[in-house]
Image (tube, helix red, strand yellow):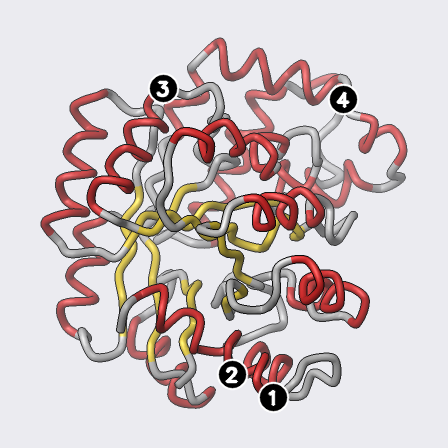
């Protein structure tokens, strides 16, 4: 059995199912994404991001990063951090019109394919208390297995946001899985200082208060300019808390190299490492490519491959 723990329904569902069949994947976890650009009008959040941007060591020390992220037509004199994020969301909507996938839309997809697809909802903790409560109620009523959250694109720090604790209380009470983005993200969030809220270390105060299954998406390791950026922070959390898991999506090239496999094996073992393709987001990759990358990996035993590709997720998802 192969389970893909990380699929974005950004394209037609029939294509997702064809890709799963082609790769021999039995189940796929598809994710809602609650994004809201109105957060850019929050002066407190924008002030924090401005301070991080203008103190970025990465931008100063990485030649060409500015143009590769923002394009050559963005000049310093017309630049503002808020405009940078506005442009990012505009380009995201232009490239992926379905980038904001509602809980209802994911439920409709899963309802049509309950034998193949497992739904995770999404909650944006910068919304009003009533909206957050509505989202949590939907997640419960739709029977979702868990929640996907992105501290980068949803602009929150888990240790500082009170509403995030409401989500954790819900997950603990209802035994939902939290799939939590860690590491950098495309666009402006390739600058590590701007993605800092997705450093796994910020979860530690939360993990001291609540206990429920949490999956560190990308194991803190996705970064175009610094692969493995917060891998050690993710590994430390997994070692300290046995209810913390990680998936390899968008970072398999780093996480499955020989020295990294050895560190995971010796520190926490392979029982909490999950396969994820991040399909269709990762450039020049698809589900079959990622499955074969695990199957043909010379640094994993056959037993470890089976655990990563499905057995661990089967136990976590209780299927």
Q: Which mark is residue 260?
A: none
Q: CA distance from mark 1 to mark 2?
A: 6 Å
Vertical comparison of 5 with 218: above or below: below
Looking at the rendered image, the quarter that the C terminus falls into is bottom left
Residue linked to disc 3: 162
Q: CA distance from mark 2 to mark 4?
A: 50 Å
Point out the tag, 4 or 3, that comes first from the N-terminus.
4
Residue linked to disc 1: 302
Point out the tag, 3 or 2, that comes first from the N-terminus.
3
Q: Secondary structure at mark 2?
A: helix
Vertical comparison of 91 with 307: above or below: above
Q: How many marks?
A: 4
Residue linked to disc 2: 306
Point out the tag, 1 or 3, that comes first from the N-terminus.
3
Mark 2, Cα crowd under 10 Å, few <14 / some 14-19 / many 20+, is some
Q: CA distance from mark 4 to mark 3?
A: 36 Å
Mark 4, Cα crowd under 10 Å, few <14 / some 14-19 / many 20+, is few
Q: CA distance from mark 1 to mark 3?
A: 43 Å
Please tell me whether mark 3 or mark 2 is closer to you in this view.
2
Residue linked to disc 4: 76
Q: Secondary structure at mark 3?
A: helix
Please tell me whether mark 1 or mark 3 is closer to you in this view.
1
Q: Secondary structure at mark 1?
A: helix
Q: Are marks 1 and 2 in contact (CB under 8 Å)?
A: yes
Q: CA distance from mark 3 to mark 2?
A: 39 Å
Q: Are marks 1 and 3 in contact (CB under 8 Å)?
A: no
Q: Are marks 2 and 4 in contact (CB under 8 Å)?
A: no
């Amino acid at each position: 059995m192969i389970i893909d723990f990380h699929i974005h329904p950004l394209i037609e569902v029939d294509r997702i199912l064809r890709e799963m069949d082609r790769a021999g994947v039995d189940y796929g976890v598809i994710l809602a994404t609650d994004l809201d650009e109105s957060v850019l009008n929050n002066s407190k959040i924008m002030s924090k991001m401005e301070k991080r941007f203008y103190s970025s060591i990465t931008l100063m020390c990485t030649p060409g990063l500015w143009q590769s992220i923002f394009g050559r037509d963005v000049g310093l004199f017309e630049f503002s951090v808020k405009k940078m994020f506005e442009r990012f969301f505009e380009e995201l909507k232009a490239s992926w019109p379905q980038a904001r996938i509602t809980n209802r839309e994911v439920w409709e997809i899963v309802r049509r394919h309950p034998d193949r697809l497992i739904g995770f909802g999404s909650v944006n903790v910068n919304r009003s208390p009533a909206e957050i409560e509505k989202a949590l109620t939907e997640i419960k009523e739709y029977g979702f297995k868990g929640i996907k959250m992105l501290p980068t694109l949803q602009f929150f720090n888990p240790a500082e946001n009170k509403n995030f604790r409401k989500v954790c209380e819900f997950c603990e009470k209802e035994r939902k899985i939290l799939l939590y983005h860690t590491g950098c993200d495309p666009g402006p969030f390739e600058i590590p200082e701007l993605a800092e809220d997705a450093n796994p270390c910020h979860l530690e105060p939360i993990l001291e208060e609540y206990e429920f299954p949490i999956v560190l998406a990308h194991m803190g390791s996705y970064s175009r300019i610094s692969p493995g950026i917060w891998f050690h922070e993710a590994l430390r959390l997994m070692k300290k808390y046995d209810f913390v898991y990680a998936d390899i999506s968008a970072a398999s090239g780093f996480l499955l190299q020989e020295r990294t496999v050895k560190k995971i094996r010796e520190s926490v073992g392979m029982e909490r490492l999950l396969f994820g393709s991040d399909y269709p987001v990762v450039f020049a990759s698809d589900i079959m490519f990622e499955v074969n990358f695990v199957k043909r990996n010379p640094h994993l035993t056959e037993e470890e491959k089976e655990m990563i590709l499905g057995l661990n997720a089967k136990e976590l998802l209780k299927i």
